[in-house]
Image (tube, rainbow, N blue to C red):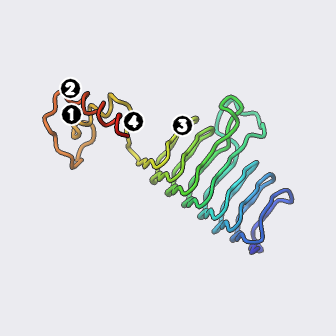
């Protein structure tokens, strides 16, 4: 185990020998890191939190700390993270709240880009990419293999139908052309797409 002399690892944290904890990192009580994880530098990893193997967390990320929710009173809620995730600079991931089930969960093989925020009680599936600056509020569910960018729209039938009808009206500068689809045709296309997911 390589722990930089400037890092602080709480006595109650579990850090396997295969992990690297870089300069000025803080690993709190109740943290369980999986094999071959790396905290690059200046990472705050609070607990209770359980990380799988081969996770890499970049500078100034704050992961597993208490939620920003007025109902939170210091209860021991949790964060669970799968394997092979890349957590980039300044990402924040908060533990759950009691009212939301007490657990925030990140799947495996995810990329959370710089400045993304994952609030309390979110559940993120496997192979998810969340781009820089995206903020997910409490309790959001993101399915496997999703890609979420800043300025994304909610994935509803109504939103998809509006997008099919007139993409430029929903997002200026988008390259998708207006296809002249009627509202009825858009609804039929949405039904077709949903049936073939």
Which residue is at a point 17% across and 44% down the rendered structure image? 177
Q: Is residue 193 left or right of residue 71?
A: left
For this rendering, which residue is in front, 44 or 145?
145
Q: Which residue lies under the disc numbered 1?
A: 165
Indicate which disc, 1 or 3, sits on the residue closer to the N terminus.
Answer: 3
Give the left or right position of residue 134, taking residue 8 as reference.
left
- The residue that label 3 is drawn on is 140
Mark positioned earlier in the residue sequence (4 or 1):
4
Of the numbered discs 4 and 2, the one sitting upstream in the chain is: 4
Structural distance between the alpha carbons of marks 4 and 1: 15 Å
Q: Residue 110 in the image: state x and y as whole percent.
A: 53, 55
Q: Residue furthest front?
A: 196
Question: Is label 3 in a helix, a strand or a loop?
Answer: loop
Q: Specify the quadrant that holds the C terminus.
A: top left
Residue 16, horizontal then vertical, whole percent: 77, 66
Residue 98 is situated, as x and y percent measured from the top left of the image, at: 72, 32
Write down the quadrant of residue 91 in the picture: bottom right
Under circle 4, the secondary element is loop
Which comes before the other along the chain, label 4 or label 3?
A: 3
In the picture of the structure, the residue carrying the numbered disc 4 is: 155
Q: Are marks 4 and 3 in contact (CB under 8 Å)?
A: no
Residue under numbered circle 2? 183
The mark lying in front, picked from 3 and 2, is 2
């Amino acid at each position: 185990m390589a722990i930089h002399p400037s890092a602080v690892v709480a006595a109650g944290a579990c850090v396997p020998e295969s992990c690297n904890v870089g300069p000025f990192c803080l690993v709190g009580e109740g943290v369980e890191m999986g094999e071959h994880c790396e905290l690059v530098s200046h990472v705050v990893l609070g607990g209770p939190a359980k990380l799988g193997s081969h996770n890499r967390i970049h500078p100034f990320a704050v992961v597993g700390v208490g939620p920003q929710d007025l109902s939170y009173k210091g209860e021991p809620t949790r964060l669970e993270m799968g394997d092979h995730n890349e957590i980039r600079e300044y990402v924040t991931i908060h533990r759950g709240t009691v009212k939301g089930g007490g657990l925030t969960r990140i799947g495996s093989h995810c990329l959370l880009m710089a400045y993304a925020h994952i609030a309390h009680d979110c559940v993120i599936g496997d192979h998810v990419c969340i781009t820089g600056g995206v903020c997910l509020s409490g309790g959001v569910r993101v399915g496997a293999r999703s890609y979420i960018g800043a300025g994304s729209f909610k994935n509803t039938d109504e939103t998809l139908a509006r997008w099919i009808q007139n993409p430029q009206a929903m997002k200026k500068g988008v390259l998708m052309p207006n296809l002249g689809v009627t509202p009825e045709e858009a609804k039929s296309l949405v039904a077709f797409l949903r049936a073939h997911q």
